[in-house]
Image: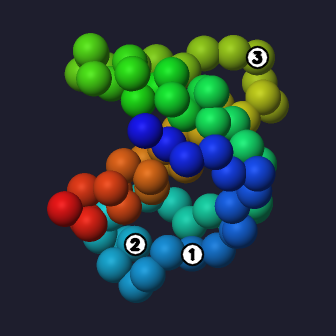
Amino acid sequence: MFTPAVEVEAGCPPAHSYAVGLPCEITAFVSRTRELEALSLLFTRHRLVTVVGPYGVGKTRLAVRYGWLEHERHVRV
């Protein structure tokens, strides 16, 4: 479902980003394709998914990136 990307540029999405409720991505997102695919699979089976791990490993960053990817996927439809 997700195309492997080595790095996604940092920056704020289009002006409607405020209405989406997701923060701008202020840092580059370096390939975590496997984790994004796992989140996608989990969300097809469950309404609520909790990402856990030690502090500083990128849980929030991963969730924000997944949120923007899902938003972009639904906007294109």
According to the picture, the residue beneath numbered tag 1 turns out to be 12
Return the residue nearer the eye: 44 or 3. Answer: 3
Check disc 2 and report the residue beneath it: 17
Do the residues under discs 2 and 1 have CB atoms within 8 angstroms?
A: yes
Residue 54: x and y, percent?
A: 76, 17
Q: Position of residue 21 (x, y in %)?
A: 36, 59
Which one is nearer the viewer's eye here, 69 or 20? 69
Q: Is residue 28 left or right of residue 2?
A: right
Q: Residues within 10 Å of mark 2 (few under 14, many from 20)?
A: some
Residue occupying the point 27% across, 23% down: 44
Task: Give coordinates of residue 39: x percent, y percent.
Answer: 47, 26
Q: Residue type at mark 1: give it.
A: Cys
Distance from the alpha carbon under mark 2 to that under mark 1: 8 Å
The secondary element bearing badge 1 is classed as loop
In the rendered image, the residue lying farthest to the right is: 56
Which residue corresponds to the image point at 26% horizontal and 66% vertical from the top-left?
76
Q: Which mark is residue 54?
A: 3
Q: Check the image and report above or below for 68 versus 16.
A: above
Task: Check disc 3 and give the amino acid type.
Answer: Pro
* Residue displayed at 80% across by 31% down: 56
Residue 32 seen = yes
